[in-house]
Image (tube, grey):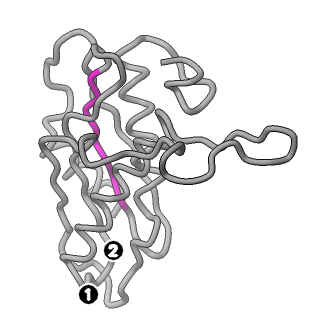
Amino acid sequence: RHKAGLSKAAEDAQWGKQLPAGVAQGIGMHDEYKSIVAYVMTVDVRGREPRMTRCTIAVDNGFCVNPTGTTSSLLGQAHDGFALAFRAGLHVDNGATRESNFHDYKWTRMFDSAPEMSVHILPNSNVLPGGVGELGVPAAAAAAANAWARATGKQPRNFPLNEYGA
């Protein structure tokens, strides 16, 4: 199941294709809730901030009960993972969080969405449905950080990268 998910994401994303300097693909995979997901994310670091330009997702969630909900959830989780890798973080000053709401918490917004995003739900592999709750967040964050590392030649050490290294 892991290999099938990884192969589908890599194939659709054209893993390894030639990209301009400062643009790279990264991959991340996670299994939880009886489900497996793989993300291939293309990140462009040539601008003021890193930008997700493409994201390909493949999921095997056993018996998929709600394909539309699964797709929507995994697309949103791509943005969550991207935000965690690059800009979202809580800061604690004297025992209190500095951020108080969405106006000062640097989460992704609609304009951060990649122009190309796709989700592939693999054929039912199990009679039991698996979950997708937060399944994609770790894989998406890993894909974003790996893409950044390949595009910059630096190893990410502290997150969010926009604050500590991007």
Left or right: 22, with 32 as reference point:
left
Residues drawn in magenta: 37-44
Residue positioned 40% across, 71% down in the render:
35
Q: In the rendered view, tell whether residue 150 sits above or below residue 125.
A: above
Residue positioned 14% across, 24% down in the render:
17
Label 2 Cα neighbours within 10 Å, binned few <14 / some 14-19 / many ≥20: many
Does residue 42 show up magenta in the picture? Answer: yes
Disc 1, SS = loop
Q: Amino acid at mark 1?
A: Val
Image quarter of the N terminus: bottom left
Q: Which residue is mark 2?
A: 61
Dominant SS type (magenta): strand
Residue positioned 87% across, 40% down in the render:
94
Q: Which residue is mark 1?
A: 65
Left or right: 164, with 114 as reference point:
right
Q: Amino acid at mark 2?
A: Asn
Q: In the rendered view, tell whether residue 75 sits above or below residue 67.
A: above
Residue 12, image x and y in percent?
A: 12, 46
Residue lying furthest right in this view? 94
Residue positioned 36% across, 28% down in the render:
147
Label 1 Cα neighbours within 10 Å, binned few <14 / some 14-19 / many ≥20: some
Disc 2, SS = loop
Residue 73, image x and y in percent?
A: 32, 67
Q: In the rendered view, tell whether residue 101 sits above or below residue 148.
A: below
- Find the distance from the CA under tag 1 to the CA under tag 2: 9 Å
